[in-house]
Image: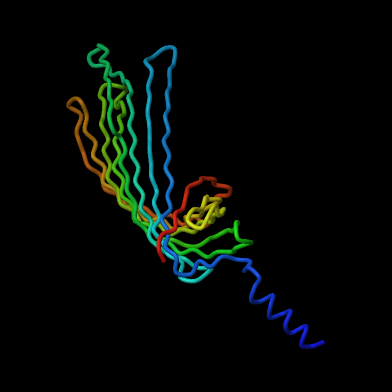
Amino acid sequence: MKKIYFLVIISILVFSKPVLAQFEGKKFLSGSAQIDFGNNNPEMSQSTNGYSAGINVNLGKFKTNTRASGWNLAGSIGGQKAFYQTFTNGSQVNWEKSGINLVGAQIGKFWQFYKHFNEKVGVFAGPGVNATYQNTRSYEPVLEGQYLTEIKSNSIGLALGVSAGIYYRLSEKWWIDGSIGFSSPVNINYSITDRKSTGDFEDFRSKSMSYSLTPSFTFPSVSFGVRYFYNR
């Protein structure tokens, strides 16, 4: 009888399908993109419109079945068409400003730890560190609307964060994954801002450095992307 039980156990171990897929050594490429458009059409003034777009790409590898790490690359761009009014010597001057007003880039390193519930679904979370660059441009009336000031800013930053996500396995090569929350407790930023006006108002440059410690978690924060696995 013991021999029969032993043979049954061996048969189960040999012929049964594993509950979880094996990910160790697999490399992946994942990404997401977004495009937003906005329009404001008030009754008493001319309409304004804007757009923004961003892309995020992760290059990673599973070190073990439940641990992965890799690099994050991201970029963003935005633009706007807007109208402003200034009053010089009692006369109204209308300004139309359009074009790109935001360009950003990011590179970072991430570490992810996984909990696989079955062959299809799992969750992951882990820390990351990101270096960022951003260039922005905006306009602002000053001195009771006498001048229109162009504000250009260049900033670089370093952020330490934690993020969490979920995945659904479509096939051996493809996943759908999504963010479900994030935290960015440490941020350091250095910026240089130039202000240039349309009249005799003095131009000037300012420099600033800021940091923040905000150990709060934003949940939920939902976004979806795709992940592709390539040769081991």
Residue at 30%, 39% in the rendered image: 136
Choose top left, top right, bottom left or bottom right for residue 10: bottom right
Q: Is residue 67 above or below residue 90?
A: below
Q: Quadrant of the C terminus?
A: bottom left
Q: Is residue 51 above or below residue 170?
A: above
Above or below residue 132? Residue 38 is above
Residue found farthest to the left? 200
Nearer the observer, 90 or 15: 15
Of all residues shown, which one is farthest toward the bottom? 2
Task: Identify which residue is drawn at 44% across, 69% down.
Answer: 25
Which percent across, then down, holds residue 227?
46, 53
Extreme residue in the right direction? 1
Horizontal and vertical percent for residue 153?
28, 42
Q: How many marks?
A: 0
Q: Quadrant of the N terminus?
A: bottom right
Percent x, y of residue 15: 65, 72
User: In screen coordinates, is 37 left or right of 163?
Assistant: left
Residue at the (33%, 39%) spot, across then down: 77
- In the image, residue 121 sits, relative to residue 54, either above or below, namely below
